[in-house]
Amino acid sequence: MKPKACVVVASEMTVRAFLGPQLRAMQDHYDVTLVVNSPASDLLRDLGVAGRVKRVALARAISVPGDVRALLKLVRLMRRERFDLVHSMTPKAGLLAMVAAQLSQVPVRIHTFTGQVWATRTGLSRALLKLADRIIVRCASYTLADSPSQREFLIGERITAPDRIAVLGRGSVSGVDITRFRPDAGRRRDVRERFHIPDGSVVVLFVGRLNRDKGVLDFARAFATLAAEFPDLHALVVGSDEEALRPAMTRLCAKHGERLHFLDHTNVPEEILAAGDLLCLPSYREGFGSVVIEAAAAGLPAVASRIYGLVDAVVDGRTGLLHATGDVADLTACLRRVAGTAALRHALGSAARDRAARDFSPSILASGLLDLYARLAADSAGSAKNGWYRRFGKRVFDFVGAATAFVLLVPLGAVVAVVVRLCLGTPVLFWQSRPGLMGVPFWLVKFRTMSDRRDGRNNLLPDAERLGTVGRFLRAASLDELPELWNVLIGEMSLIGPRPLLLAYLDRYSPRQARRHLVRPGITGLAQVSGRNGLTWEEKFDLDLEYVDHCSLGMDLKILARTIWQVISRRDINQSGHATAEEFTGTVSR
């Protein structure tokens, strides 16, 4: 019998626009239930997904009586169905779904952040909306952000901790289907004929909801200026008018109203995008901005505001241009450059399509999501076995142990630092980004053990030639690991756990091997006391997974005791024929 999964979103439009690839991937592994504020009972069937649709009134606007009724209905549904996993998206749906899932004791609870309503708010409104997001994080097992910059924003605003949120792939909710969104001369001609736009005109598109946070009034002001300069420039605005802004946009462009076109809604955005020459998205707040990569797949560059989310969707100067948020003059200047220079427009559009095809495959994102589900399910099962230690005791053990060792080993660390400075030069410390809990990167810090010796062509010499006597001694005695106590103190690492390997290895793991990231990486671990570099990669990963599945206080104490003996005996420091561990290139049987 398949595990039972429930996906909760407020809008049918969100499901149709973004969730098709995810739901189709899920149906092969889960019994899928979709909760949405829509009467369309055949919604999943339309998307080619086997599953059930449950309607719950998840209105976007705040309504205390209605929201309470929706929460109670979700709790009843989740308790009755006993879901193994609940995944929510959008703010209101996320708050109600995560609270209901925790009350119903659903083992795996995930929410995806796609932008923050409170980013442009102030005062009490901002505080209350931020509190709602903190409640979501508190109730969720884990969270996702749809872009790296949004993840950093949420961490910086203290909505969540670094080890509680990740980004799938390069970002976006579902990627982009480049067979659907593509340059198409036929579509381009048909749409332009429908709006009576001459064939040789330059068309700048806005696609999204019409509200102030989307910057549509800034867009209208910029277009009014440029329309006076470029007689062949047209604007096509596509989206529902949520705040009745269409009359204001029309007034701003009154002198050129015949070249400002509106379309309330479309179920075929690929046709609209094929008709354009560039996309404009001057938002004040945004998630990843999926329309940007859809436009990119159609060969269109984008002019967008320099805010979190959009800075990940647009590579400034390569796939489009970024302008200062709220700066109409800067927006106008960027649009002038792209609209007025065909060669630039085509170069940016070509690079944008290449990037969309390379970095935003729906299948890769769907695979990453399924892998995350499996990891969290396994972690939930493991936590049930040794719940008290995994949830609370291990972190206390790490903090007390690292703090004590830090204080006792300060004199030794100072001596090592002086030796490194005299023998290897600066910098004394070596910093490298490594994958931590759930694969989220962090900065690992160690004492430097290699010199910067280079050959006649200024290339670094092989590791064996740069390691030297001092470096070999530091590694043999594990003294280079001392600074990692700082990583443990701040919660990025544990004293005991799988070693943090290279970020490049993340794409080489099998789904089973990737489970090693269900726990924090350690300074030492079961593999390190069971053969260390004398083991094959597969043997190391088997031991890592044994630790993930059976982590306990007793196991940690045994590993710690064996580590002391391992350091004293200096066994299995290097692999035969290698100055350090051999590179992991992937497992043949994955």
Image (cartoon, rainbow, N blue to C red):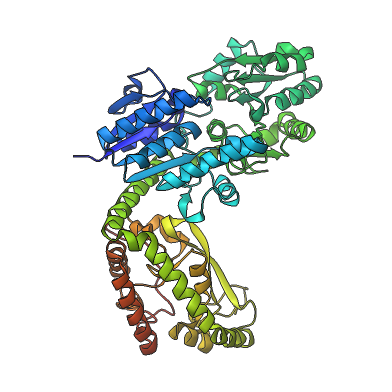
Work out whether residue 415 or residue 341 is closer to the camera in this orientation and state it.
Answer: 415
Work out whether residue 184 or residue 332 is closer to the camera in this orientation and state it.
Answer: 332
Quadrant in which the C terminus is drawn = bottom left
Residue 383: where, in percent of width, then height?
A: 31, 56
Residue 97: where, in percent of width, then height?
A: 40, 35
Work out whether residue 288 or residue 360 is closer to the camera in this orientation and state it.
Answer: 288
Residue 91: where, in percent of width, then height?
A: 50, 34
Question: Which residue sits at x=49%, y=26%?
Answer: 64
Question: Which residue sits at x=41%, y=70%?
Answer: 397
- For residue 123, above or below residue 264: below
Residue most extreme to the front: 65
Work out whether residue 502 or residue 525 is closer to the camera in this orientation and state it.
Answer: 525
Question: Which residue sits at x=67%, y=32%?
Answer: 282
Q: Is residue 286 left or right of residue 509?
A: right
Q: Is residue 317 left or right of residue 392?
A: right
Tell me, yes or no, if residue 360 can be seen here: no
Q: How many marks?
A: 0
Q: Is residue 513 left or right of residue 280?
A: left
